[in-house]
Image (cartoon, rainbow, N blue to C red):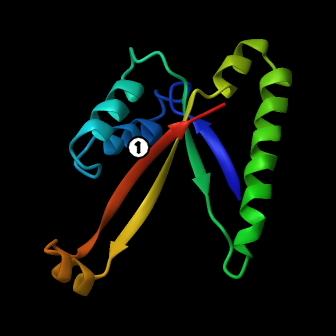
Amino acid sequence: FLSAVSLQRHRADPSVGRLISLLGSDRVEDGPLRQRLAGLLAPSGGANVGLLLSERMVNTPVQLVPHAVESLHLDLGWAAANAEPAAERASLTFEWLVLLAHVTLDAQAGAESGGAGGSGGAGGSGGGS
């Protein structure tokens, strides 16, 4: 599946509020990305940020992913044009999409490069349409 949830529209929901606080926590490396993310997710940030939810079924060919993304784009466009009540339409036009990804580092590769191996969460963001 592939879907997007407006973090601004659903900010008052306790589960979304928890996700927003996790995105601003130490799960995202300190630096420009964390600062940019904090600015986008701030209540006064003004940007409509969507959380991209995705799960690819095991054995689904990776070649199908671009088609799934295109389908999501079309679905969001349709929803933004046709949502009822009309006031909800703006919340479906995302300026940014955030995708969380779990990253596992190979402990041996980390030792060879001088880094500490292990696993952790990573956040990424990209421009929306």
Nearer to us in this view, 12 or 59 = 59
The picture places residue 105, in percent across and down from the top left corner, at: 31, 75
In the displayed structure, would residue 2 be above or below residue 74?
below
Q: Where's residue 22, x and y in %?
A: 33, 45
Query: Around disc 1, counting alpha carbons within 10 Å, would you say few (fewer than 14), some (14 to 19), or many (20 or more)?
Result: some
Nearest the camera: 129 or 21?
129
Write the residue at 68% across / 73% down.
57
Find residue 42 and report its image quarter. Answer: top left
- The residue to which callout 1 is attached is 19
Q: Is residue 60 above or below residue 64?
A: below
Give the residue drawn at x 45%, y 59%. Answer: 101
Give the secondary structure at mark 1: helix
Give the residue displayed 40% in from the left and 35% down from the top: 17
Which corner quadrant of the image does residue 19 belong to? top left
Location of the C terminus (image quadrant)? top right
The amino acid beneath tag 1 is Leu
